[in-house]
Amino acid sequence: MKAPLVITLHSPQGGSGKSTLALNLALQYAKQGKKTLLVDMAGYGGLPAMCKIPIRGSGLSSLITVLEQSVELPNYDHFAGYFKDAIVPYKDIRDFHLLLSASPLKMEKLSSVYTDYLIETAKKEDYAVILVDTSSELCERNIACIESADLLLIPTLQDVASGWKVILFKEILASLHIPKEKVYLIANRVTKYSGFSNKEFQEEIGFTLLSEIPDISKQVQRHVNSGIPMDLSGKRKVSAMFQQLAQKIMLQVV
């Protein structure tokens, strides 16, 4: 079985759109017939609210409990059953599954060892694409997600503070020996009024700017607040935008 593509979304800037991009990319891959898993590794995971899915003690919460109660990491054959029970299918899209985050206190218990084990378990399932959403802080859990990724996507906003944080984050990636060839920038909520040059920023930081996502909040906010992701809002241009981004990402691993 071919190994799945693991894509981690991380940014040192909070509110840069990591979860929104992760969700809509996952929908695109699933609609293309690629069995897709979206893992919510954020400390304050917003995907349950964005998808209107109740957690009910399942998801990562149940898996962290199993790991905590084990003297050593459990055998895969034993743990696989718990893992499959923790997965939530997304409504009527057959090829899209979610592994939702636990409470912030419980997420803090995810060490790098536990995180690596969970991602390796996911890779042993029959997924074509695994997207990992993270929070903005630098912690063991997020570092493990970054190191395990085939591709790292960094959403950034058109402001000086966001750009400066990404520049500082570049030093962290270098210390982790993350090859710059697997790191890509996504300029999010782009407007013509920002006075911010994404091309100049790309040249300064040295990572490839993969895509520019325009600010479409006014067009889709009503749908998003109702638990309907942007890609499913019925706006053709919006769906086409995420489709193009999904295709660009795949071209980086061909």
Image: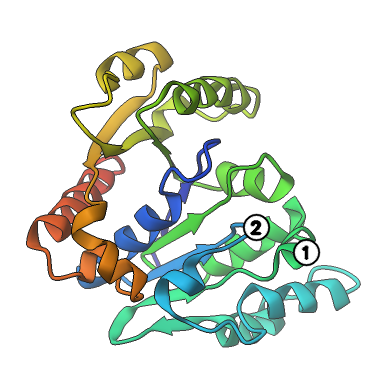
Where in the figure is residue 76, as x and y percent of width and height?
Answer: 67, 75
Residue at which label 2 appears:
43
Left or right: where 82 falls relative to 47: right
Q: Residue at x 43, y 79 (%)?
A: 52
Q: Residue at x 38, y 34 (%)?
A: 157
* Total numbered labels placed on residues in the image: 2
User: Which residue is at the front of the view, 110 or 72?
Assistant: 110
The amino acid marked with disc number 2 is Gly
Q: Residues within 10 Å of mark 1 (few under 14, many from 20)?
A: few
Q: Quadrant of residue 178?
A: top right
Where in the figure is residue 164, as x and y percent of width and height?
Answer: 50, 20
Q: Residue furthest right?
A: 71
The amino acid marked with disc number 1 is Leu
Location of the N terminus (image quadrant)? bottom left
Describe the element under mark 2 as helix, strand or loop.
Answer: loop
Residue at which label 1 appears:
105
Q: Residue furthest left?
A: 236
Q: How is the image coloured?
A: rainbow
Q: Residue at x 32, y 67 (%)?
A: 224
Q: Earlier in the sequence, mark 1 or mark 2?
A: 2
Describe the element under mark 1 as helix, strand or loop.
Answer: helix
Q: Residues within 10 Å of mark 2 (few under 14, many from 20)?
A: many
Where in the figure is residue 84, as x and y percent of width and height?
Answer: 56, 84
Q: Quadrant of residue 4?
A: bottom left
User: Which residue is at the front of the view, 237 or 89?
Assistant: 237
Where in the figure is residue 193, as x and y percent of width and height?
Answer: 22, 27
Q: Is residue 125 visible?
A: no
Location of the C terminus (image quadrant)? top left
Quote the CA–CA distance across marks 1 and 2. 8 Å
Q: In the displayed structure, would residue 190 be above or below residue 69?
A: above
Q: Is residue 66 visible?
A: yes
Task: Give residue 75's mark.
Answer: none
